[in-house]
Amino acid sequence: AGSTDNMTMKAKVVRFLFYVDSSTVVGWIEKLEPGGKYHGKESDLYAALLNRHKSDPSPADPPQKSDTKARVVNMYALYAPEKIAGVEPILDRYKGREEELIATLVKKYGDEPCTGGSDGKAKTNRTYKERIEAIYQKYCPEKVGNVPGILEKYKGKESDIIQKLVSMYGPEPSGESPEEFLARVTRFYKKYNAEKVDTVPDIVAKYKGRE
């Protein structure tokens, strides 16, 4: 069965604009923020971009595991659009250590976005209620009781409130223990970078708290 697409329309617009011209994407992002010309009008902007460029230049979803650039672009488009213009320097810095980069971003922001592929992640299988409650439990427990009202207010735009809370408080909790995270990263390296499996504990320890 296919996974749920959790890329917001804003993220899809940011990704589209990045592939059209990465040098101008930051200016567009400002227009998508609250108070900006296109805030709340992302669907209209996406349709206009499609009309102008005939097709979305983004790589096919879901990206291949070997296409690190597409995977990083997807993560920044969803979680930290203001950083997307810096993708190329980051890829250069992690050249030869691409899976370490992905693991670092997953730890910092959350799982890779589901984009209609067949490998949906556990986090996106949780309900929005569970995800929002987890964020508040970690960062602002006194607001957990407000979740039902927040869900009602953002009905149909749940992914937007998730993104807003991540920007406000920090990375979305993964819901896994340090041991579970270590095991997941180890599996990741065994599959895609087996020769560096022995370095996983050091990598996880190195980035603890500042992933």
Image: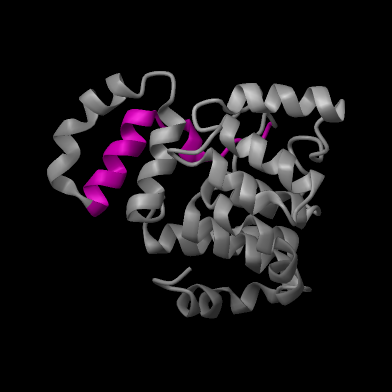
Q: Is residue 132 on the magenta stretch? A: yes
Residue 16 visible within the image: yes
Q: Position of residue 100 (x, y in %)?
A: 64, 68
Q: Main secondary structure of the magenta part?
A: helix
The N terminus - image quarter: top right
Rendered residue at 41%/63% (across/down): 179
In the image, residue 154 above or below residue 184: above
Q: Which residues are magenta?
A: 118-139
Residue 54 vs residue 92, the one in the foreground: 54
Q: Position of residue 161 (x, y in %)?
A: 38, 35
Rendered residue at 59%/41% (across/down): 113
How many marks on residues?
A: 0
Rendered residue at 62%/78% (across/down): 198
Q: Position of residue 40 (x, y in %)?
A: 49, 27
Q: Is residue 121 on the magenta stretch? A: yes
Q: Quadrant of residue 147?
A: top left
Q: Position of residue 127 (x, y in %)?
A: 39, 28
Left or right placement of residue 144 versus residue 62 in this view: left
